[in-house]
Amino acid sequence: MDFEYKISTRSWGQLTDEQLFAFCQENRNLRFERTREGEIIIMSPTGGETGNRNIKIAARLELWNEEARLGISFDSSTGFILPNGAMRSPDVAWIILNRWQALSEEEKEKFPPLCPDFVIELRSKTDSLKILQKKMQEWIENGCRLAWLMDVQDQKVYIYRPGKKVETLDSFNTKLSGGQILPGFELDLNILK
């Protein structure tokens, strides 16, 4: 499926970051993102299999992070205000510690106004690969240093890095390395099967 559920905000005008945060707080039972054009996208909850895979990935990143103490990890409920004005929410995110510490307490409490250094998006059966690939490119264009798109049903992983061609792995029988961005972090993709 190559569509997203969007809410028109024409009669209100484009929501500011503050208004968007308030709107999301008033509608906590729904998840939203905002495109750089200001359109509000309704995000559907994940199914059981995808939710289980998300927690496995997030748990492994956080366990590594607790040992490494190099940054801050985030789950799929966290929205980030990107430099292009979009508010996006990846399945898993990580920010290097000094960038997080440079934010004010208010910025940390709301949608942090920065792009994560590392993101993971996990494609569920109902997600459009084309839309997710476009979103991954947006992460990179806004400052993300490493991004992994995991397509479980097709057993492919797309690795995004700034200034490099997208790398495609055609198997989940491997481990991904965080390289210089997340030194020592490895994710065994067999956990996602």
Image: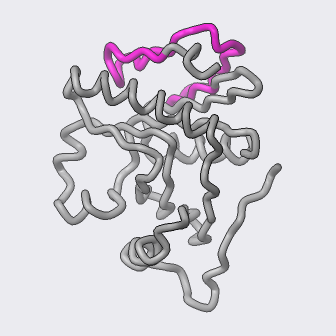
Observer-nearest of 134 and 50: 50
Residue 172 x %, y %:
64, 14
Q: Is residue 179 magenta?
A: yes
Observer-nearest of 48 and 86: 48
- Magenta-tinted stretch: 158-187
Residue 183 x %, y %:
32, 17
Q: Is residue 91 magenta?
A: no
Residue 145 x %, y %:
43, 33
Magenta region, mostly helix, strand or loop? loop
Residue 175 x %, y %:
52, 11
Residue lying farthest to the top in this orientation: 173
Q: Residue at x 51, y 42 (%)?
A: 91
Specify the quadrant of the image occupied by residue 11. bottom right
Observer-nearest of 145 and 65: 65
- Against 13, is 116 above or below? above
Residue lying farthest to the front in this orientation: 48
Left or right: residue 126 versus residue 63 is right
Q: Residue at x 41, y 20 (%)?
A: 178
Left or right: residue 34 versus residue 172 is left
